Amino acid sequence: SQTIHQWPATLVQPVGSPLSLECTVEGTSNPNLYWYRQAAGRGLQLLFYSVGIGQISSEVPQNLSASRPQDRQFILSSKKLLLSDSGFYLCASLAPTVGNTIYFGEGSWLTVV
Amino acid sequence: AQSVTQLGSHVSVSEGALVLLRCNYSSSVPPYLFWYVQYPNQGLQLLLKYTSAATLVKGINGFEAEFKKSETSFHLTKPSAHMSDAAEYFCAVTGGKLIFGQGTELSVKP
């Protein structure tokens, strides 16, 4: 079956510092990959999604970017963090050819100070 | 494009009463629909999913949902609420993008 590894699990970063959250998928190929931010009372806000290597769609204009350098690797980045970037970030994978099952990473808690 | 709307951010029912959590979607392609549950400080757990087979989908913990194309709805129901059902519930739709609703917090009163 499919598994997703997401790291780091928690991090505290100063304002203006860079960010890199990484997500890797095992057990499938060519999945659709997604980055979400979950905030209390706001559900899961889709930030970026990718249907293939180098293909990134941005849903919410903000201080973040995403990249997919390999088929099963999805990276969320920022050059300069803002206080408002604090939150819980979740990576997800969906393999359309495998029953449309969604797999989630463990999540990353980001605190910008 | 896909979107999903969950009607009611908070729903409160008495133990033993019917649970009804509403979800309406829009999709330009035939959708796949999901319901997830999240307990406090835990990750998302799949309750059930619709993938174009039977329109009435049965899930875990006694929950079920019915896909109604004419109403673009996928409401979640359970005949008799239990205290352990108190959690946040998310509806999701995919047809490329994977979009989640804002969530509905279910409270169960004794």
Image: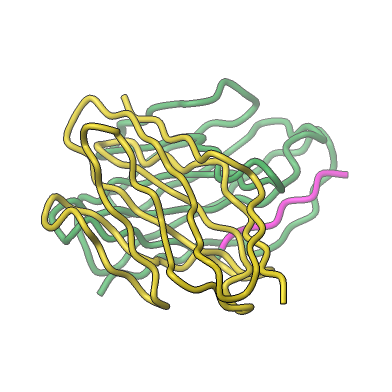
Position in image of residue A89 (x %, y %): 60, 50
Q: Could you tell me what secondary structure mostly forms the magenta stretch?
A: strand
User: Which residue is at a point 82% across and 35% down the rendered structure image?
Assistant: A83
On the rendered structure, is B82 left or right of B5? right
Region in magenta: A107-113
Q: Colour of chain A?
A: green
Position in image of residue A32 (x %, y %): 29, 46
On the rendered structure, is B49 left or right of B12? left
Position in image of residue B29 (x %, y %): 18, 30
On the rendered structure, is B42 left or right of A26? right
Q: Quadrant of the C terminus of chain B?
A: bottom right
The answer to which of B89 and B109 lies nearer the viewer is B109
Chain letter for the yellow colouring in the rendering: B
Position in image of residue B109 (x %, y %): 71, 70
The answer to which of B54 and B81 lies nearer the viewer is B81
Asked if residue B31 is among those painted magenta in the image, a careful observer would answer no
On the rendered structure, is A96 left or right of A47? left
Asked if residue A109 is among those painted magenta in the image, a careful observer would answer yes
